[in-house]
Amino acid sequence: MFVGAAMGMAVANLPGLSLVPAIGMGLAATCAAVLQLPLTSVLLASVFLQSDSLELMPLLIVAVVVSYVTIARLPEPSTVRLPRRSPLTT
């Protein structure tokens, strides 16, 4: 969650985006990607934002939907098995 908040702080200098909405969007998007629970991610971000949550709700919902759909559309990572090393003998 805090990685998303840090990413939100990093992009807060983009035109038209202030600090609190950027933090909320990063937090909500990261939670949606990791937990894969979109409704819970929106609610969790709104709890953290407290007084600003009502006016930021549309931004949070868009960030969660984009994050959730992106994660759902990405292919599963392939499992590559590396050969085991034999222990060194001395």
Image (cartoon, rainbow, N blue to C red):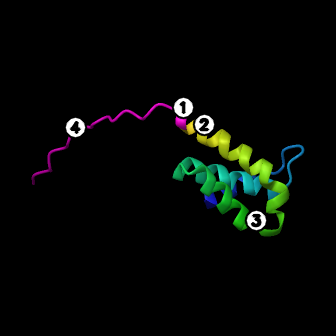
The x and y percentages for residue 29 are: 65, 49
Name the amino acid type tagged 4.
Answer: Pro
The answer to which quarter of the image holds residue 90 is: bottom left
Q: Residues within 10 Å of mark 4 (few under 14, many from 20)?
A: few
Name the amino acid type tagged 3.
Answer: Leu
The x and y percentages for residue 50 are: 77, 68
- The reply to whether callout 1 and callout 2 are in contact (CB within 8 Å) is yes
According to the picture, the residue beneath numbered tag 1 turns out to be: 73
Residue 10 in the figure: left or right of residue 89: right
Pick the residue in front: 90 or 11.
Answer: 11
Image quadrant in which the N terminus is located: bottom right
Circle nearer the viewer, 4 or 3: 3
- Residue 49: which numbered mark, if any? 3
| Distance of label 4 from label 3 (alpha carbons) | 48 Å
Mark closer to the chain start, 2 or 4 = 2
Mark closer to the chain start, 2 or 3 = 3
| Distance of label 1 from label 2 (alpha carbons) | 6 Å
Vertical placement of 68 versus 55: above or below? above
Circle nearer the viewer, 2 or 4: 2
Pick the residue in front: 61 or 20.
Answer: 61
The x and y percentages for residue 75 are: 47, 31
Name the amino acid type tagged 2.
Answer: Val
Name the amino acid type tagged 1.
Answer: Arg
**Residue at figure coordinates x 81%, y 51% from the top left:** 12
**Residue at figure coordinates x 55%, y 38% from the top left:** 71
| Distance of label 2 from label 4 (alpha carbons) | 35 Å
- The reply to whether callout 4 and callout 1 are in contact (CB within 8 Å) is no
- Residue 69: which numbered mark, if any? 2
According to the picture, the residue beneath numbered tag 4 turns out to be: 83
